[in-house]
Amino acid sequence: MPFRLLNSRMVEAQVVPGQRLFSQRGAMLAYKGDVSFTPSITGGQGGVMGMIGRRIANEATPLMSVEGSGTVMFGHGGHHVHVIELTGDTLYVEADRLLAFDGTLQQGTMFMGSQGGVMGMVRGQVTGQGLFTTTLKGHGAVAVMAHGGFIELPITAGRPVVVDPQAYVAHRGDIRNKLSAALGWREVVGRGSGEAFRLELSGHGTVYVQASEEKL
């Protein structure tokens, strides 16, 4: 795994010849060695068609390609960082949550409705994340960002997990999502800002939740 957490808000990546990483533009904090940084047009292995799809989906967060030999420190906006290791599976995550990831991972875009039907589309509107999400698939590591730190919640058959949509960061595995309206304690005590929603995830996998309802 090329990423190592330096603290809760910074990650260090080992860059070796013949391999490359991708990161958000402007996320490099410092580096040592002979390392080059190049704006990425395609943003991973999705090629030109992948780039077009991400732009249409508004999932085209500017990326840079990182190559050479050395060590690079990444961080962005003081956000908390979490490293996720993929072993052939797929991570579903919003593009602006990506700090850096292995160039070996295949990047794509998925229409939220294909996982959650109409409710998946509604979820995108409610959370402000849009109707699409970014996918990263293969073997490699991903550094993602959130407010206030992360928790990993396992999802198993017959034991769904309910998450505040604003606290949702990403998920992996064979998971279905369903958004529903619910009157919660915030409305009861007068802290609600309108109709409350809850995101229910079922199946088998992991959901990553941040300790805040703030957007990046």
Image: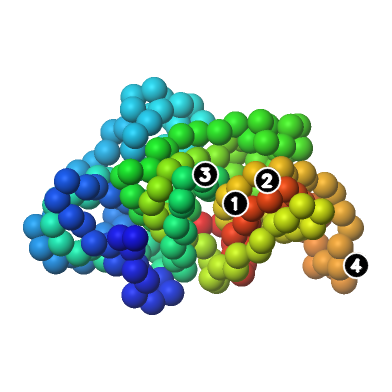
Secondary structure, mark 1, is: strand
- Residue 96 appearing in the image: yes
Label 2: which secondary element? strand
* Image quarter of the N terminus: bottom left
Foreground residue among 137 and 195: 137
Going by the numbered disc 1, the residue's amino acid type is: His
Q: Are marks 2 and 4 in contact (CB under 8 Å)?
A: no
| Image quarter of residue 131 | top right
In front of the other: label 3 or label 1? 3
Q: Amino acid at mark 4?
A: Val
Question: At 50% from the left edge and 34% from the top edge, which residue is drawn?
Answer: 109
Per the image, the residue denoted by label 2 is 175
Instruction: State the separation of the CA atoms marked 2 and 4.
Output: 31 Å
Rendered position, 171 above or below 74: above
Q: Residues within 10 Å of mark 2 (few under 14, many from 20)?
A: many
The secondary structure type at the circle numbered 3 is: strand
Q: Earlier in the sequence, mark 3 or mark 2?
A: 3
Quarter of image, res 8: bottom left
Q: Amino acid at mark 3?
A: Thr
Q: Is residue 42 above or below residue 212?
A: above
The residue identified by callout 4 is: 188
Residues marked 2 and 1 touching at CB (< 8 Å) = yes
